[in-house]
Amino acid sequence: MNLDTVPRDRLPALLRAMPKAELHIHIEGSLEPELIFALAERNGVALPYPGVEALRAAYAFTDLQSFLDIYYAGASVLLKAQDFEDMAMAYFHRAKADNVVHAELFFDPQTHTARGVPFETVISGLARACRRAQDELGVSSALILCFLRHLSEEEAFATLEEALPYLGQFIGVGLDSSERGHPPEKFARVFARCRELGLHLVAHAGEEGPPAYVWSALDVLKVERIDHGVRSVEDPALMQRLAQERVPLTVCPLSNVKLCVFETMREHNLVELLDAGLVATVNSDDPAYFGGYMNQNFVEAFEALPQLTARHAHQLAANSFEASFADEAQKQRWREALDKVFA
Ligand code: ADE
Ligand code: ZN
């Protein structure tokens, strides 16, 4: 098919059908209100909301912190390995329905260990779901441990220490939570140690924080991907660096609108990022909180941004495979499957 002349009304079906990888999903952000209440009941946890509707009504965020406060409260219902497994399986079913063939899942161990849930409980439930996703759904996946940047580097080191016996069960580390006032360089030593351990490195940067945080994620933490990174457009030299070195950005359109990084989807800079030659990808971030999973992100972004064409759709899916931490042979198979959809 000629990618430049596909009619716009055919784009939603193409976006839904194309195989894709998801590289920016906080698995705790996939907890739907219904599952939060079911787990609360199963575990005898009291919630400060009378029911699903009241909880959903509280999802009116003004910035990242206003979301994080509710997101950490929601995660308080997770106590047993089975809870983590159920949460991740619910996500994998949604991912499969959206033709996600590969997902790299962030998890926040400190959110759980701080409540007395052992690291082992968290990772064993998630790892079991990852094995089941492959066996039952044919979705491949991997886990990325995120350090909470509002906590100290010492606490990150303590978490890494707890994680060492499970090194074979996660492929990398990331950095998330409140960005403003917590620059990447705060975690320079712990990321250096993770690098020595052979882990992949990623970090949230340039979501609410300035381009300087993207520079230090690259130069100090030596990350391989930037999560969000949308504020990079404010710095032409940074844009050139990201394009030249093909550093992927895991962009999350619905998240950016929900957290007021952009006023509406029409203001989103996804087109600018792609047209500058960046390896931008589309992802869902915290889909239970932001109004949709992968395909919803694609469809709403393409609906709001008339410059986006079938060529961009193909590019975004190809970028998601290139930016993943899968091996080259696997990436090649995904690219071939992608090209068939666009043939
Ligand atoms: N944790 C979960 N979602 C996040 C986001 N969008 N930014 C930073 N930390 C997060
Ligand atoms: Zn995120």
Image (cartoon, rainbow, N blue to C red):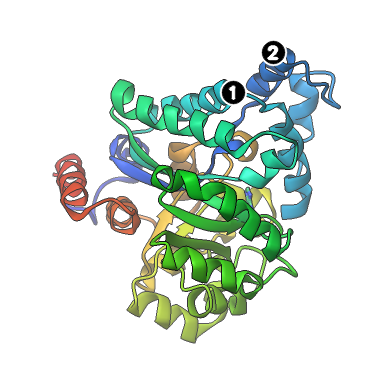
Residue 53, x across and y down, in percent? 76, 21
Mark 2 residue crowding within 10 angstroms, few (<14) / some (14–19) / many (20+): few
- Taking the image as shown, residue 179 lies to the left or right of residue 95, namely right
**Vertically, is 269 above or below 12?**
below
Q: Residue furthest top?
A: 42
**Label 1 beta carbon less than 8 Å to ligand 1:** no
Give the camera-side residue of 21 and 86: 86
Residue appearing at x 40%, y 64% in the figure: 248
On the question of residue 225 being in view, the answer is no
Q: Label 1 sits on what residue type?
A: Asp
Q: Residue at x 43, y 68 (%)?
A: 196
Which comes before the other along the chain, label 2 or label 1?
A: 2
Q: Between residues 164 and 181, which one lies in front from this camera angle?
A: 164
Location of residue 150 in the rendering, given as x and y in whole percent from the top left corner? 73, 59
Q: Is residue 189 left or right of residue 6?
A: right
Q: Amino acid at mark 2?
A: Arg
Residue 107 x %, y %? 56, 43
Q: Residues within 10 Å of mark 1 (few under 14, many from 20)?
A: many
Q: Is residue 113 left or right of residue 243?
A: right
Q: Residue at x 60, y 37 (%)?
A: 28
Could you say which disc has been placed on residue 169 in the image? none
What whole-number distance in Å separates the C-alpha atoms at marks 2 and 1? 9 Å
Q: Which residue is mark 2?
A: 42
304 vs 294: above or below = below
Asked if the residue at tag 1 contacts the one at tag 2, i.e. Cβ–Cβ closer than 8 Å, the answer is yes
> Can you identify the residue that label 1 sits on?
83
Quadrant into which the C terminus falls? top left
Residue appearing at x 19%, y 40% in the figure: 341
